[in-house]
Amino acid sequence: MIPAAFEYEKASSVEEAVSLLQRFGEDAKVLAGGHSLIPLMRLRLAQPSALVDINGVKELSFIKAEGGKLRIGAMTRHVEIQNSDVVRQNVPILAEIADEVGDNQVRNMGTIGGVLAHADSAGDYPTLAVMLEAELVTNKSRYQAKDFFKNVFTTAMAADEVLCEVVFPVANGPHKYIKFRRRLFDWAIVGAGAQKVNGGWRIGLTNVGPMPVRATAVEQALASGATPEQAAEHASDGLQPSGDLRASPDYKKHLARVLTKRAIQQAQGA
């Protein structure tokens, strides 16, 4: 398929990108890695009037650990996160997730900011951001992850906002992220993450609704002394996943319980 006609401009700074977005209007889109947006454009499921390419904005590519936080620039590539010693020392689950994003081409071109701003319910980074209470910083605002994602493919950002960085708290305790998929490079049919933080557990779920889910009922059960098997039974509490060609809603709920149990057990070393 061929995308609908669009204008194209390349920005060399955040300020220039914002100016271009304001000029083109609310139908313009930011182009980062492009591995999520371009396929939608080819199918004409997305028809932006203009693309503002921020691949030349070098200031948005960085990985820094400071003050108990891990700061990652929005244009940081998956492969850079995957191979970063700083990430592995401070938020190792993030490096492990990056290691399983797509194939080599995707990991070398795709960016963490692109995945977060795209807000696909099957994305892994959004789940981790919500699970660890990350902060997403734009040219205008600072959003808590739980407030950033509004619906599938929808965020709290205005049309002229550019995501600049994501800030994770240091979380280097026991952890595991598991995603169930039919083929190696597929998006997750369902994913589940477990991370121990300050003596308690954080549990997150991927692709069980329009937005990433933090499974607080599971966290509370674990805090009350429940076993992984007992706690994981609460993973499907309140879920209303949509069915698709790969899984029915009931099957996604089943996977949420099974994968949550496995993630907790493997994080505990069982």
Image (cartoon, rainbow, N blue to C red):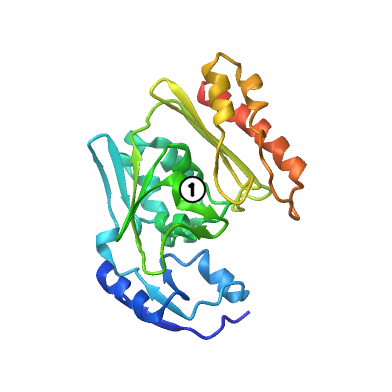
At x 48% / y 48%, what residue is drawn? 126
> Judging from the image, what secondary structure is the residue with disc 1 in?
helix
In this rendering, the count of numbered labels is: 1
- Residue 170 sits in which quadrant? top left
At x 52% / y 59%, what residue is drawn? 154
253 with respect to 125 (left or right) = right
169 with respect to 129 (left or right) = left
Quadrant position of the N terminus in the picture: bottom right
At x 45% / y 51%, what residue is drawn? 148
Query: Measured along the vertical axis of the image, is residue 66 above or below residue 20?
Result: above
Farthest-out residue, left: 67
Quadrant position of the C terminus in the picture: top right
Q: Residues within 10 Å of mark 1 (few under 14, many from 20)?
A: many
- Residue 159 sits in which quadrant? bottom left
Farthest-out residue, top: 225
x then y, percent, for residue 109: 42, 62
x then y, percent, for residue 249: 74, 45
x then y, percent, for residue 197: 41, 27
Amino acid type at mark 1: Pro
- Residue 61 is at least partly visible in this image: yes
* Closer to the camera in the image, 234 or 206: 234
* Closer to the camera in the image, 48 or 217: 217
Provide the residue designation for mark 1: 126
- Residue 270 is at least partly visible in this image: no
x then y, percent, for residue 119: 51, 56
Query: Measured along the vertical axis of the image, is residue 145 above or below residue 223?
Result: below
* Closer to the camera in the image, 137 or 258: 137
